[in-house]
Each structure stands twice: as C-alpha cells, then as structure tokens.
C-alpha cells in the first residue's frame, strides 16, 4: 500500500460526538493518513474518547492542551507532523476518498504552491459551499498554468498546506484566537511568495452543527474584532484607521460590535508591535478582492 504523505490535523473542543464520527471517516481513507488531534482543554468526554481511539489505532496521536488555544492549536499539530503536507479538518469535516492523493500530486508538481483550498461540500444536502464557489470565480491572475484558481483566502477545515510553507509564514495567529484566522495566514503566505490555489478536485465534506443565537453572536463579534486587527497588522495606515473607526461607530448601536471593539482595544498594543505592511502586489490583490 502507498504510504500517506499527508497528516490530518484536527483541533477540537467539547465535540466528542461529531469528532468520533469524523475520525471514523478519516480512518477509512486509503492510504490511511496519520492523524493528530489536539484537544483544546475540553470539559466533556472528548479526551477519554481520544485516549481509547489512540490505543486502538496506530498512526493516531492525541495531545491534551492545558488551555484553549483556539485556531493556533493547529500550529502544534503541524510541528508534530512528520509528513511534507498537512491537511486540516474540524470535528465536523472530513476528506473525500482520493482528495489527499490529488493534493499531493499538485504539491509535487508545483513547488511554489504553499496551500490548496479544497472544494467544500456541505452535508447532508451535498451542496457546494458558497465560499468554494466564490473561490472558483476568483478574479486574481490565473495565466500561469498552475492547477485550479489563484485565491487569497480559504476555509481552514478544508485546506491542505505544504508544511514548510506553513511554518515559513508563522502559522495561525495566537492573537486572533478564533474568527477570520484564515485571512491573516493567507496574506502572510502570499507575502512570503507562496501561491494559494483553489483546486475543486480536492474535495472535503462539512456537516456543520446547529448553533444557537448566542453562539452566532459570539462568533460574529470575533470576526468583527479580527477583521480590524488584521487591518492594523498588515494594511496601510489609512485602511487600518477607517476599519477601527467603523467598528467604533458600530459599537454604539450593536452589542456584537461593542464586544468586538473592546477586544480590539485590549489587543491593539500587541498588534501595533507586530505590524508589518504587505508587499505592494499582495495589497493590490487584497484590494481587488475587496472591490
């Protein structure tokens, strides 16, 4: 049997039921990929379930984190991986048969490609995720003969990275924790010269769990905060000011924006210390996508 050259990394928290289903699907892949699961300080049965699974299956490694690192927990999985490529899954997403092999072929053929955004199929209806459709219609330059379409964003739970490119770009930001973390990593990869491609033949499935209104509001606040933080970290001064002022204005009438603005203020000193403007070409592409 061909040896897998892609490790699947999952960061999870308090999702024992959906995680067990996802892991069964990943363990059925051939060739079976190594799997690394990082438990973000769960308080349910997740850790006990993972211990049983790791004992039963070779190639499954589990790590219990002492605190919730959010998206940055994936960084530890990439560091622990022994393969040249790493595929991310969430506890409610999994890779289709043949998808990882397809991605490996693209990486092998195209050494400049640092990240492949897979096509996301939303279950149980089997519809293509709107974000995948947007990537398929990407307006970025595409006349270079590489597979797929050039993009400057991705869904973390259906993306595959070249391990060396991920580490070169610094991985997911701890400052952002959760929400829009893909946006910062995408521009950081591009700033380091790596190419990001949407390849629809690399397919993954996602069956999102139902979330209540409070959870939706919390996640929206995180995205609002992090969108502005990313502007401070990487965009021109005028763009960062306008983003911050817009969020401050929204905070007077929207509780979600108020929470986002408070989180922004706490993180602003660190964001200013780590500020690094994007190269001109990358900034141009960001503006093109914004238009």
Image (cartoon, rainbow, N blue to C red):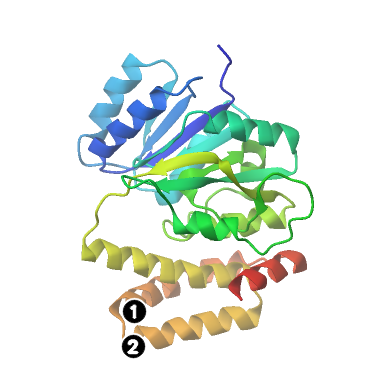
Residue 111, labelled with which disc?
Answer: none
Circles 2 and 1, Cβ within 8 Å, touching? The answer is yes
Q: Is residue 71 in view from this perspective?
A: yes
Left or right: where 174 falls relative to 217: right
Res 224 → quadrant? bottom left
Left or right: where 227 falls relative to 186: left
Q: Which residue is mark 1?
A: 258
Identity of the residue drawn at 53% across and 66% down: 270
| Numbered label tally | 2
Identity of the residue drawn at 71% across and 64% down: 282
Q: Position of residue 279 (x, y in %)?
A: 74, 65
Q: CA distance from mark 2 to mark 1?
A: 7 Å
Left or right: where 263 falls relative to 20: right
Badge 1 marks a residue whose secondary structure is helix
Using the image, determine if residue 3 lies above or below residue 123: above
Res 258 → quadrant? bottom left
Q: Position of residue 169 (x, y in %)?
A: 64, 49
Crowding near the residue tagged with mark 1, few <14, some 14–19, many ≥20 C-alpha atoms within 10 Å: many
Q: Which residue is mark 2?
A: 252
Q: Is residue 81 in view from this perspective?
A: no
Crowding near the residue tagged with mark 2, few <14, some 14–19, many ≥20 C-alpha atoms within 10 Å: few
Q: Which of the image's four quarters has the C terminus?
A: bottom right
Using the image, determine if residue 186 lies above or below residue 67: below
Q: Nearer the viewer, residue 6 or 117?
A: 117
Who comes first in sequence, dot 2 or dot 1? 2
Q: Which of the image's four quarters has the N terminus?
A: top right
Res 219 → quadrant? bottom left
Identity of the residue drawn at 46% across and 47% down: 120
């Amino acid at each position: 049997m061909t040896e897998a050259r892609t490790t699947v990394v999952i960061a999870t928290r308090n999702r024992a039921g959906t995680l067990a289903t996802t892991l069964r699907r990943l363990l059925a892949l051939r060739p079976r990929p190594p799997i690394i699961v990082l438990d973000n300080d769960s308080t349910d049965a997740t850790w006990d379930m993972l211990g049983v699974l790791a004992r039963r299956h070779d190639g499954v490694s589990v790590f219990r984190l002492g605190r919730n690192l959010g998206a940055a927990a994936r960084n530890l999985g990439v560091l622990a991986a022994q393969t040249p490529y790493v595929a991310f899954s969430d506890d409610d997403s999994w890779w289709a048969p043949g998808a990882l092999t397809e991605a490996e072929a693209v990486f092998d053929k195209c050494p400049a490609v640092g990240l492949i955004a897979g096509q996301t199929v939303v279950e149980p209806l089997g519809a293509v995720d709107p974000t995948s459709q947007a990537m398929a219609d990407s307006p970025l330059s595409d006349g270079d003969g590489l597979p797929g379409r050039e993009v400057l964003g991705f869904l973390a739970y259906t993306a595959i990275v070249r391990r060396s490119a991920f580490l070169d770009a610094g991985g997911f930001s701890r400052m952002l924790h959760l929400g829009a973390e893909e946006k910062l990593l995408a521009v950081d990869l591009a700033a380091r010269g790596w190419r990001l491609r949407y390849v629809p033949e690399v397919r993954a499935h996602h069956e999102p769990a139902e979330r209540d209104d409070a959870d939706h509001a919390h996640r929206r606040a995180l995205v609002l905060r992090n969108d502005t933080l990313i502007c401070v970290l990487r965009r021109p001064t005028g763009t960062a000011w306008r983003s911050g002022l817009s969020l401050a204005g929204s905070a007077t009438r929207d509780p979600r924006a108020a929470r986002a603005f408070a989180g922004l203020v706490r993180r602003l000193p660190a964001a200013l210390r780590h500020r690094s403007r994007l190269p001109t070409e990358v900034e141009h592409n960001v503006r093109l996508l914004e238009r």
